[in-house]
Amino acid sequence: MTSTSARFRTFHQACFQTVWEPTALSESGFDLALWLQGHGVSADQPLDSLFCKWLPVRDLERLEAEAEGLQALMPSAGELVLPRPLAVGPASGRALLVLDRLPLGGADPLGWQRLGRCLARLHRRSAESGPGVFGWAGDRWIGAGIQRGGWDGSWGRFFCRQRLGDQFSTLARQGLQWQESTELMERLEPWLNRHQPSASLVHGDLWPGNADVLKDGQPCIFDPAVSYSDREVDVAMASMFGGLPRGFFEAYNAEWPLPAGAEQRRIAYNLFHLLNHANLFGGSYIASCGASIRQLLQILRP
């Protein structure tokens, strides 16, 4: 039988480039195999099949939320691949999440079409089996930012208060405000309520860095920030930061067409992510927020 120290070295060599903070792994001397056994993971689990995320221990809730989100998505995922969260908890003074290691980087262009179809099916299944209201049970995380929870039967009210309103308030505490933000919130809520979407379980942070095609051509998603929301929020964010390939959007619409007005609502939904990035990083995101606010008001004003 391979010794624990040898297995740790094997794991270290396989995953050195995939941990968030590689130096924490290499310098800690942490016994991963023993820790996994303490969390109910079989000692026969090949360590080179795992993917680890390390964060400061104060950020354990972020990793717990990621694991919770993956588990929530799986019953509706169908053929869409997600990494299983195998264990999460404090580890050697840090926070650790261990997942299945996915063979990313597939070159099959049809994989992006499969992703579009599979995501539409996930949205439909979860809307049919879900609670029928919008939100999540408590606050969670989107990246390093807070994503507010709670439940609401009104999509317009939920999005304006728990998404945009919270971000505007956080920026205001930093001394950054837009004069038009109050008018935007007053006009946006009833406009979104007229849309009347179903409450689908969404990934919530579906930029191109959180989706891929596996080497066998299967589509996969990871690192979610889940909630029950309008399904359009996922499709909207998939157009940000370079965007997913065109085949993804065409296949999604072929499987479950988006209703009229989706392009206009995309501006509102992506404003949430721009505001979150403005809170976290500042810089050019602040100007992008202002431009989106003005663009939305041009749509909303009579």
Image: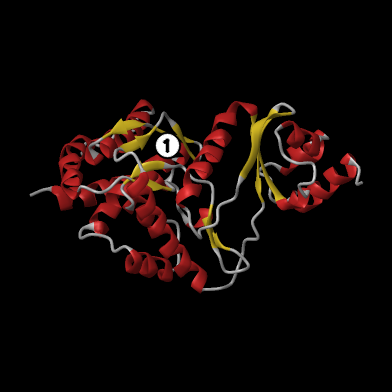
**Spot occupied by residue 287 in the image (x, y as percentages of width and height):** 34, 47
Q: How many labels, in total?
A: 1
Amino acid type for the residue under numbered disc 1: Asn
**Spot occupied by residue 286 in the image (x, y as percentages of width and height):** 37, 43
Q: What is the residue that sits farthest to the left in this orientation?
A: 302
Query: Can residue 28 be seen here?
Result: yes
Residue 256 lies in quadrant = bottom left
Residue drawn at (52%, 53%), measured in percent from left and top? 210
Q: Nearer the viewer, residue 217 or 121?
A: 121
Query: Can residue 274 be seen here?
Result: no
SS under mark 1: helix
Residue drawn at (72%, 39%), measured in percent from left and top? 41
The crowding category of the residue bearing disc 1, from other C-alpha atoms within 10 Å (few below 14, some 14 to 19, many at least 20), is: many
200 lies left or right of 190: right
Scheme by which the image is coloured: secondary structure
Q: Nearer the viewer, residue 92 or 167?
A: 92
Q: Is residue 59 above or below residue 208?
A: above
Residue 104 lies in quadrant = bottom right
**Spot occupied by residue 172 in the image (x, y as percentages of width and height):** 33, 29
Residue drawn at (49%, 41%), measured in percent from left and top? 69
Q: Which residue is mark 1?
A: 279
Q: What is the residue that sits farthest to the front in this orientation?
A: 129
Residue drawn at (78%, 50%), measured in percent from left and top? 46
Q: Is residue 212 above or below residue 194?
A: below
Residue 33 lies in quadrant = top right
38 lies left or right of 285: right
106 lies left or right of 238: right
Q: Nearer the viewer, residue 280 or 148?
A: 148
**Spot occupied by residue 62 in the image (x, y as percentages of width and height):** 54, 34
248 lies left or right of 91: left
Q: Nearer the viewer, residue 233 or 73?
A: 73
